[in-house]
Amino acid sequence: MRRRADALDREILALAVPALGALVAEPAFLLVDTALVGHLGAEELAGVGIGVAVLSTVVGLLIFLAYGTTPAVARLLGAGDRPGAIRAGIDGIWLAIVAGVALLATAPLAGPVVALFGAASAVTEHAAVYLGISILGLPAMLIVLAATGLLRGLQDTRTPLVVAAIGFAANAALNVALIYGAGLGVAGSALGTVIAQWGMAAFFVWSAVRAAIRERVPLGIRWGDLGRTASTGGWLFVRTLSLRAALLATTAVATQAGTTALAATQIAFTLFSTLAFALDALAIAGQAMVGKALGAHDGAQARAVTRRLQRWGVGFGCVVGALLLSVAWVLGGVFTTDADVRSALPVALVLLALAQPIAGFVFVLDGVLIGAGDARYLAWTGIVNLAAYLPLLLLALVTGWDALAVIWAAFSFGYLGARAITLGLRARSDAWLRLGAVR
């Protein structure tokens, strides 16, 4: 038993550690853009901030291109059908191309979309330039997501890490050259990122084509398979939409609660997102390992992986929760000089710290059920969880209690707690243990 647990731990780490590196590299692209543009001026920086907000939302909603491809590929790999696994990845890439081409048609809408933010005219102009050029890179970004899903399904998280690292370096060099060397300013920042994204996409496509040729897999688009892939992706889209809605609702209520509550909430969300990277890496390992086990008709292995991941998730949550709790009263000074925000922030951070074991449990089971292809359940319970959360969140506006405390108690124990219950009940059942290559 101990040997089996050690073997599972090694396999989890072999997938999760490189996945963590690739996850960190993704926001690093935006950090480079922000840092370099920040030296141009406040208006340019604000404009890029609006553009990044729009792009992040679009890409976040389309993350199903990776999350839907990984389990499909892993199942077929586990069933011993490597050509079929690669074909499933090719279908995912084709879906990314179709979706990306459709998004190119939205380029003329860049100006009207950023105008909705109501920023000053100069800021809006910079945002429109940045977003208009960045849209040209959306097909590449989606191809990278789908191809990353293919490789993860094949139990390879190292190649995406290497490509992400090279892409990050290329992006930084191109941005310096185009922003300052060529004097293109905000346009140079967007253009440099677009070029780096297409370079990454080209490598992934070349890699997928080479694998397909080696396994004699047809490369042409198959609309029937594309429709089935899109159907699974649709359920994952609904799941992601419910998560985004919860975050937006939290921000909206914090806005109504006042500037101090909003500022503290934004800092807390920044920390929550940072801590989520490691948990996301464990979830990605879960997607790949569970999908492969179920494809191999090995329900016992899928159960063993799930139990081990739960221990990792809760254990890591306890560690990072303790660390966050230890610095909750001093961390505010890193983010702000505002005395009111620094004074209010600890209550949010304490509640967030106490909820980290729950977050670890939630993240890994989310990955397990995605790996099992249980997207429909995740979509419907995502809506249920949101419906349970919103009334708790609104208590911040209708009671005389500390609004920030209510917001973060509702999010940490209400929303994450609801997700833990719905995911935990599903994981304890046999409904998600559908064996074989077909989900």
Image (cartoon, rainbow, N blue to C red):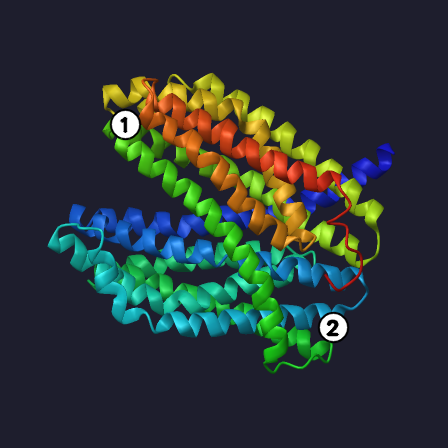
- Where disc 2 sits, the SS reads helix
Work out whether 312 lies above or below 58: above
Q: Residue 161, image x and y in percent?
A: 56, 54
Left or right: where does residue 430 sit relative to residue 113? right
Q: Residue 342, image x and y in percent?
A: 30, 20
Which residue position holds label 2?
83
- Where disc 1 sits, the SS reads loop
Is the residue marked by circle 2 packed among few (<14), some (14-19), or many (20+) residues within 10 Å?
A: many
Q: Residue 87 or 414: which is nearer the viewer? A: 414
Work out whether 131 lies above or below 259: below
Q: Residue 287 or 374: which is nearer the viewer? A: 374
Which residue position holds label 1?
336
Q: Is residue 165 visible?
A: yes
Q: Is residue 180 visible?
A: no
| Mark with earlier residue (2, 1) | 2
Q: On the image, which quarter does residue 110 sit in?
A: bottom left
Locate the C terminus and report the quarter of the image it occupies: bottom right
Is the residue marked by circle 1 packed among few (<14), some (14-19), or many (20+) residues within 10 Å?
A: some
Mark pair 2, 1: CA separation: 53 Å
Q: Residue at x 72, y 54 (%)?
A: 291
Locate the N terminus and report the quarter of the image it occupies: top right
Q: Residue at x 84, y 56 (%)?
A: 297
Q: Residue 40, image x and y in percent?
A: 19, 50
Q: On the image, which quarter does residue 254 sit in?
A: top left
Left or right: where does residue 439 sit relative to residue 414? right
